[in-house]
Amino acid sequence: MLKDITLGQYFPMDSVVHRMDARYKIIITMVFLVMLFWGQHLTSLLAGLLFVAVAMICSKIPPKMLLKSIKPIVPVLVITGVLNLFLLSGGKVLWEWKFIKLTEQGVQTSVFMLVRICLLIAGTSLLTYTTSPIVLTDAIESLLSPLKKLKMPVHELAMMMTIALRFIPTLIEETDKIMAAQKARGADMESGSLIQRAQALVPILIPLFVSAFRRAEELALAMECRCYHGGEGRTRLRQLKSGLRDYVALGLTLLLFAAVITLNTVLH
């Protein structure tokens, strides 16, 4: 299961989406998320599905990678979907047994929620798949630069966000190694009651926390040795430059967003 978590991983490829300005990719992703949760009709889900499909084709990211990013949250989706099915009431009763009722509103809400979350994970995963952590840091800092006038540490915030995103795959790999080592020593983490399984995680969490703090200390020491002192006076190897493809992609996304808003207003 841990190997299926692909959040924060970057897959270098030569595609239109990879060559786009990271700032525009972040803005387009934000517009996509608003569009996905704005509409209350099937049109918003179809628009979100169209967006993800086109972005996947243009980025050359295989569908199995998007499915792999959704796989770790399947248990959460199943639990929340079942709860919405039987706890929400309204509309025609489709099935009833004693105090349990399955209604049209419950089915509709459950399906909408599951599809929205899957599209949300797929859309945001495409952003990290096609953008390196360093470029993502520069893009976030550039978009948040107006907040510098309010004396906010924009560079430090962007750096912290990207470092956290960057170290997710590293911590997952470290956790997998610790679990393998504990299993080799005879640890049983798959059987027993819920309390026993939780207690079996203690030998994993303690070395993981120690390793995480050690990596953080090594990173801080490395940054100090390189005379890192924030974003002031810092130069960048790769400059963010926008082009025609960025304007076209943002324009098409805004048109799709406007169409969803219009249809939502008409069908309301």
Image (cartoon, grey):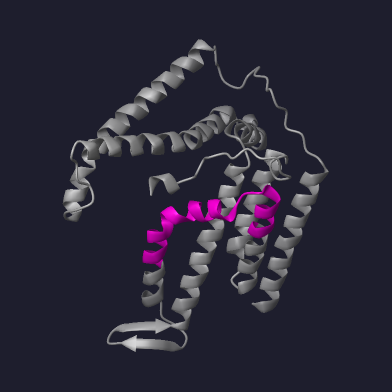
Q: Residue furthest front?
A: 184
Residue 245 at x, y percent in the picture: 79, 45
Tell me: residue 130, above or below residue 32: above
Is 216 left, or right, of 256 in this rendering? left
Q: Which range is magenta? A: 52-80
Could you tell me how many numbered marks the image carries?
0
Q: Nearer the viewer, residue 235 or 183?
A: 183
Q: Is residue 214 magenta?
A: no
* Above/below status of 244 relative to 111: above
The residue drawn where x is 36% and y is 29% is 212
Camera-nearest residue between 76 and 89: 76
In percent of width and height, residue 119 lies at 56, 59
Residue that appears at 47% across and 79% down: 105
Please say whether residue 53 is one of the residues in the magenta stretch. yes
Which quadrant holds the C terminus? bottom right
Res. 78 image quadrant = bottom left
Residue occupying the point 70% across, 40% down = 14
| Residue in view at x 68 percent, y 23 percent | 236
- Main secondary-structure element of the magenta-colored stretch: helix
x%, y% of residue 35? 64, 60
On the rendered structure, is 247 left or right of 104? right
Residue 175 lies in quadrant: top left
Q: Which residue is more in the foreground, 266 or 218?
A: 218
**Identity of the residue furthest to the right in this view:** 244
Where is residue 246? Give x, y as percent. Answer: 77, 45
Residue 101 horizontal side relative to residue 141, left or right: left
- In the image, taking residue 57 as reference, residue 75 lies left or right, namely left
